[in-house]
Amino acid sequence: QVQLQESGPGLVKPSQTLSLTCTVSGDSVKSDYYYWSWIRQPPGKGLEWIGYMAYSGSTYYSPFLKKRASISRDPAKNQFTLQLNSVSPADAAVYYCAAKKSEVAPIHIGDVTTDEYDYWGQGTQVIVSS
């Protein structure tokens, strides 16, 4: 059973970089056919996919966030990390890490639904304020 745990600052100032880490247990971030995603939910809105890192190390991002988002991994710590540059109050949300095991890469059009991923972290609240 894969378990995910997000960690990071709950408060970020506008224009700064948000950095969140997802610690994985139960399997390796390099295990075949896993896709490791970051997803967020702004207040009153649906689940928005940010991007994922595939088991191969390839990364894919939402076209709306690809200029500001970066996902990396640390296999030694079994973690993957999201960096989001130049944050604004519009980036305030609950941020989730999620994992899917599939021979087919996930495709996201519109809001994410919870059944699209096999495993979810509990989420971490991020506030953007000076």
Image (cartoon, grey):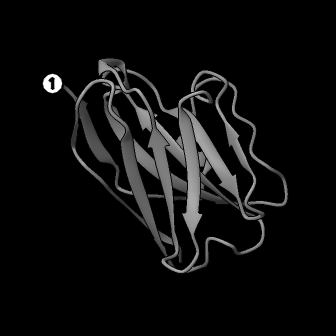
* Nearer-the-camera pick, 55 or 67: 67
Across and down, in percent, residue 46 comes to: 45, 26
Furthest residue in direction right, as rendered: 103
Mark 1 — residue?
Answer: 130
Residue at the image position 77 percent from the left and 65 percent from the top: 33
Residue at the spot x=75%, y=37% of the render?
107
Assess disc 1: are there few (<14), some (14-19) or many (≥20) residues with their C-alpha within 10 Å of its C-alpha: few
Which corner quadrant holds the C terminus? top left
Give residue 16's position: percent from left, percent from top. Answer: 32, 32
Identify the residue at horizontal 36%, vertical 40% (top origin).
18
Numbered marks: total? 1
Instruction: Give x and y (percent) for residue 23.
Output: 43, 68
Relative to 21, is 68 above or below? above
Q: Residue at x 52, y 46 (%)?
A: 38
Q: Give x and y (percent) for residue 78.
A: 52, 75
Say above or below: 22 vs 116.
below
**Amino acid type assigned to the residue bearing label 1 in the image:** Ser
Residue 101 is left or right of residue 26, and the answer is right
Image quarter of residue 103: bottom right
Secondary element type, mark 1 = loop
Asked if 95 appears above or below 47 in the picture, the reply is below
Q: Is residue 57 left or right of residue 111?
A: right
Q: Considering depth in this image, is 3 or 84 the residue closer to the camera?
A: 84
Residue 64 or 113: which is nearer the viewer? 64
Furthest residue toward left:
130
Residue 36 lies in what quarter of the image? bottom right
